[in-house]
Image (spheres, rainbow, N blue to C red):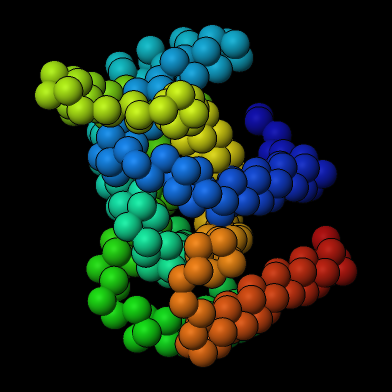
Amino acid sequence: MNARPGPAKQSDEARRGLWFGVGAYGLWGILPIYFKAIAGVGAIDIVANRVLWSVPFLLVLLYAFGQSRELRAVFRRPRTLGFLAVTALLIGTNWLLFVYAVTVGHILAGSLGYYLSPLANVLLGRIILKEPLGRLQWAAVALAAAGISGLAFQAASQLWISLTLAVTFATYGLLRKLAPVEATSGLTVETLLLLPLALAWLGFGLAAGEPVLGTGAFEIALVLLAGVATSVPLLLFTGAARRLRYSTLGMLQFIAPTLQFLCAVLLYGEAFTLWHAVAFASIWLALGLYVYGLARRARIAVTLPE
């Protein structure tokens, strides 16, 4: 008979998942700085380079950690491959829209999308995965939704960007949690599925004489690092998604849009309105409520007799 993982093992995995999540969302939060530095390259060119240069980086990781056999196995499992084809489309769309938002000066609209996505994560976790939510967690969701509604009203003209980012990323996270594949091999398959499109786009651009890699040595060097900038946070995210409750992962996601929000206002001078201030305060209060609810539930569970 197979033994279940003990409480200590489960706690260690949850702790690792927490740090993976913090790392992923922290890196995503400062990505606007990277994309602004290569804003002279077109948004589709940037995404195509992200796909292209992620492939060798991920393959090296797979072979370094002895996971190349699992990569080959995924291509022999049609159901898993179908899952990853859908997630590849979702993450590709998400990448493209976020890069577009940053390069045209709508970082706040992008941050709003990633503020909305945790709410979608929590609701998907409750509806699809049947994860229970206590009263404090529901209150946190309601409070965050109230704060975000003000931002949605303020940024109505870019709301399509925010909503598309929220839906694509929340659905991506859910499907990656359900897909029976490890983080590195799954991301490698997704990237390989997008690679033909990326190569075709870059090939047409090169044939037309367009600077698809940038124009200066510094810009080209940054573009060549797109694989690392893309793969590392996604690997951390998928590692976190497999170890944490989906609703908990959703609340951690507030780290990324908050950092993006600060980049937009403090570094790039986008307008900071009263609605932004209300939403910022509401969301962090919601996060505090949610974490307090989790801690309270954990303390009660520890004190209950076996």
**Residue furthest front as drawn:** 216
- Image quarter in which the N terminus is found: top right
Residue 2 locus on image (x, y percent)? 66, 30
Foreground residue, 188 or 48?
48
Q: Which residue sits at x=47%, y=36%?
A: 230
Q: Can I make out residue 229 in this image?
A: yes
Residue 160 locus on image (x, y percent)? 25, 68
The reply, left or right, for residue 162 in relation to residue 269 is left
Residue 176's quadrant in the figure?
A: top left
Q: Which residue sits at x=39%, y=55%?
A: 102
Question: Where is 26 relative to 205, above or below?
Answer: below
Q: Which residue sits at x=69%, y=76%?
A: 288
Question: Where is 151 relative to 213, above or below?
Answer: below
Foreground residue, 56 or 158?
158
Foreground residue, 6 or 198?
198
Residue 258 locus on image (x, y percent)? 57, 66
Question: Where is 258 relative to 234, above or below?
Answer: below
Residue 207's quadrant in the figure?
A: top left
User: Count the marks: how many?
Assistant: 0
Question: Where is 277 relative to 189, above or below?
Answer: below
The reply, left or right, for residue 78 in relation to residue 71 is left
Residue 77 locus on image (x, y percent)? 31, 22
- Image quarter in which the C terminus is found: bottom right
Foreground residue, 164 or 19?
164
Q: Can I make out residue 131 in this image?
A: no
Q: Which residue sits at x=62%, y=51%?
A: 26
